[in-house]
Image: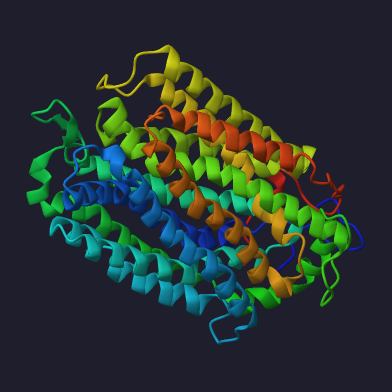
Amino acid sequence: MASQPSSPSVSNGQAPLKLNMKRTFLIGFAFFGILLLWQVYDSWCPTFLSELFKKTMNLTDEKQVQYLVGIMMAIDNLAALILLPIFGKISDKTRTKIGKRMPYILVGTFVCAVTFPFIPVFFHMNNLAGVIIMMAVTVLFAMMYRNPAVALMPDITPKPLRSKANGIINIMGYLGGAFATVVGIFFVLSQYLGTEKASDGSLKPHTWAFNNIWAIEIPFLVASVLMLISALVLFFTVRENEIAEEVKEDMKRGEEYAEVADKVEEDKPITKANLTMLLLILIAEFFWFMADNGIGTFMSNYAIYYLGTSTASNMVNTIVGGVGSVLGFAIGGFIAAKIGRKWTLLSGLGLTFVSYGVWAILTFATPIAGSGTFPVWIYVIWFVKGFGMSLVHVNSFPMVVELCSSKKIGAFTGYYYASSMTAQTVTPMLLGLLLLNPNFGWEILPIYALICCGIAAIVFFFVKNVHVKRKDVKVGLEGLGEAED
């Protein structure tokens, strides 16, 4: 049995709940692998598809194929929309010697690691069908392990500590994404996915890389290897069944401080008030993912085809945004402990809304189209946006799983991801269709994100504010403390 951490403030003979840093960090290895994969996937696949669709259809204007790129990216997300809740509910009911989440994490990671490097191989072969099939298989098995991997944290973390724990796990995830970005820069992918002038004056990716498979293969291989390593670290260090037994009493105590409209009862249907909270959170989540994923999907193409610069600049931009995100993940839980999750999250949406607004204004106020440079002010915007959205993400998932009992964490994790994946299914197609319209250009990206973010903030404003005074929960730096043995 885990030893209780000592504390001068003890209520009812029990020490305050305290987050196990070491264990949370190790659980974060699962999210490290997830974001590592998706960073590489989202950075390169839209451009792979753009070039192959243009070649297959004998087109020269990249805007003419963006709706097809959006559809292909959305089909993958549609499969995820269906599979995430399914795997969540199945894993809730799974019982094995290695736990209820671990089997899905291991199998999903292994298959993804095998199929992922074949995406650039088929692109190098100019095989559009092969690229699409490998993308689909990768996404399918990524969904097998994504829900269980994310559900593992609330499985063994008391409710009032989940925002802080989610911050640590998201930091691990962003380290994975940043690593993928750095690898891309190191192997000079900027030259591959940069631009050169064609004979007709249009911009196109450098042609030399079609004959250089390793320029695009290495980041995918590195991602696969690190995914396997992260899964093995998780498997050998986090004994799921043992830990679940150790924290059983803390989990019960955590229910007393749940930020919910009505107390959650084991094996009883969700109450009307809690259901209203859940629906409002999921609707708002849908719109903030519409904004964030919409611009994320097309940002590489924005850099190449609109700014006329290389994706190295966009990779640096991603790192800058990641730094802002890590800062937010580090302090978002502590802010929520002071002012509540609702107002912390709304503050994050407000910062994000302002950053999109500034981007929209400066896009029309400065001559950046075809300039061949990546404006410095976009880096600043991405830092602020990254910080703001991290305050959103670090608190939104805990708010969803706060509304369920321990027996339904996988199912509610599925609801959370169903909302985000619905948005990620709709937004690439919608934005791709808008770009197909001759009245719209790449300038529409910040306006589109601004509108979606504004709707999310309005909807979330009506979520009930529940801020529980936690006298038996350590806060601030003291709340992190040492790891239990």
Q: Quadrant of residue 2?
A: bottom right
Residue at 48%, 23% (x, y): give it: 359
Q: Position of residue 423 (x, y in %)?
A: 54, 51
Q: Nearer the viewer, residue 427 or 122?
A: 427
Q: Nearer the viewer, residue 87 or 98?
A: 87
Q: Quadrant of residue 204?
A: top left
Q: Position of residue 400 (x, y in %)?
A: 71, 57
Q: Residue furthest right?
A: 12
Residue at 71%, 68% (x, y): give it: 3
Q: Position of residue 118 (x, y in %)?
A: 23, 64
| Left or right of 388, for residue 68 | left
Q: Say whether residue 2 is visible.
A: no
The image shows residue 144, relative to residue 254, as above or below, that is below
Q: Say whether residue 438 is visible.
A: yes
Q: Position of residue 445 (x, y in %)?
A: 45, 32
Q: Nearer the viewer, residue 358 or 229?
A: 358
Q: Quadrant of the N terminus?
A: bottom right
Q: Quadrant of the C terminus?
A: bottom right
